[in-house]
Amino acid sequence: MDLNTRLQNVAVIGAAGKMGSGISLLLAQELGFASLENRSRTFILNLVDISDLALQGLIRYIKEQSVKTAEKQINRLRELYKDRVDLVENGEIINEFVHEVLVHIRTGKTLDLAKDSLLVFEAVFEKEELKFEVYNKLASLCPKETYFLTNTSSIPIKVITDACGIDGRVIGYHFYNPPAVQKLVELITPDTCDEELKVLSLEIAKKLGKKIVPANDIAGFIGNGHFMRDGLHAISEVKRLSKEHGYPQAIYMVDKVSRDYLLRPMGIFQLIDYVGIDVFQLILKVMNKYLTKQGLHSDLIDKYMEQGVKGGQTSSGAQKDGFLKYEKGKPVGVYNPETKEYVPVDDIFIKAVDEKLGLHPNPSLSWKNLLKDPEKDSKTQNYFTSLKEMDTLGAELARRYYNASKETSEKLVKSGVANKPEDVNSVLTLGFFHLYGPINDYLK
Ligand SMILES: NC(=O)c1ccc[n+]([C@@H]2O[C@H](COP(=O)([O-])OP(=O)(O)OC[C@H]3O[C@@H](n4cnc5c(N)ncnc54)[C@H](O)[C@@H]3O)[C@@H](O)[C@H]2O)c1
């Protein structure tokens, strides 16, 4: 069955979640355009989530975003609507397109809505039992030809297919957050995957404008395979440094080094807060279950969770407090798990930590100003060359961090999670917006 036939009945499960809503938007717009280009076909997009309120919010989000897409693609739409003499003004064309996007959508709270779908994108919570429950039900409801694309970040696909009797029909389609913007999709193809599904996955990526990086079916894949170990390295550094400097300063130091000294867009603890400490813990648990004896566990993360410090975002997208405390999205405090209080990050705090870290190798360089610099690569190389020579605490922490990240990445290749170093580098640059891939010779 070709992709266009499958697109005639598609479903998203967990449609109103962080990832599901982006995937729903991409598909809704794709089907909107497809229906304008294939007038003789009907298209249905089934959006399933357990929360009514969230589904209503999802429809509002799709509507708002479709107005923006229509504005950007007004020439394409004008061409597609050229026979519609009643549509003259841009506003009329935009309204018509938004109507076209919405008219194919059906929303519902139960999986029955997906019973005729030939292509199902799944993005429910990252909990094995829930995924099993969903897939067992879908397996009994959907036609035998239905293919499933799961957005799991860590569960081996083979575990899902074996538990639910749908061998060959599931592929890992790991979008990055937010799916409507991020270009990367990590594609996890289990050994027994149907050839047709493999081909379809590439066609879908092309249609949605995504870049595929293949990863093998090993828990955590490439993205979380690196991120979880990167986070665990940061936590072990915090524990070591906290003996001399206390937790707040140690956390601030490692966050700052991982951002400013490694020229990354975000410090590691801000990133864990963004993803959610609860999500970080969940993914670690899954990885630890399948990758035994690798120590993929953190008692500090468990402690934060026990103390109710979870990070993540509110429903309106504001950052919740976690390792760091936030005001208007900016870190203003650091959590001390010993006193269970946030310590303010004020001028006195910053000065004290900066004095301990010593001079930054090149304060004029940052992720932000290197990002669009045509000489980014040579400047980054020169930067690391000077970092190599420096004898400060900050430079030493940065070298340890760099080496840990590189070692993790090389192990991902050696252990068969990634096929080649370039794939790890692509995931980190495209999916995590790093300036450079971790497998490089900058510190040689
Ligand atoms: N958040 C990220 O940055 C990110 C990135 C890549 C992949 N992922 C993966 O995407 C998936 C979803 O993650 P998320 O962050 O969007 O989670 P989320 O909690 O934001 O969304 C999950 C959604 O699933 C819905 N849901 C729960 N049970 C359901 C059921 N039985 N039927 C239908 N809907 C149900 C919830 O109501 C919620 O809207 C997970 O597998 C996660 O690992 C997340």
Image (tube, helix red, strand yellow):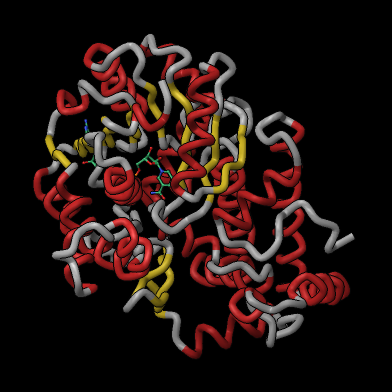
Question: Horizontal placement of 13 versus 330: left or right?
Answer: left
Q: Quadrant of ligand 1?
A: top left
How many labels were placed on the picture? 0
Residue occupying the point 35% across, 49% down: 26
Q: Quadrant of the C terminus?
A: bottom right
Question: Horizontal placement of 171 versus 322: left or right?
Answer: right
Residue 1 x, y percent position in the rendering: 41, 20
Residue occupying the point 34% across, 19% down: 146
Depicted 119 relative to depicted 141: above or below: below
Depicted 111 relative to depicted 392: above or below: above
Furthest residue in direction bottom, as rendered: 347
Foreground residue, 103 or 438?
Answer: 103
Foreground residue, 292 or 436?
Answer: 436
Residue occupying the point 38% across, 53% down: 276
Depicted 180 relative to depicted 262: above or below: above
> Can residue 163 be seen in this snapshot?
yes
Residue occupying the point 21% across, 26% down: 114
Residue 407 x, y percent position in the rendering: 75, 46
Depicted 396 relative to depicted 296: above or below: below
> Can residue 19 be seen in this snapshot?
no
Foreground residue, 67 or 158?
Answer: 67
Residue 56 x, y percent position in the rendering: 11, 51
Residue 138 x, y percent position in the rendering: 26, 19
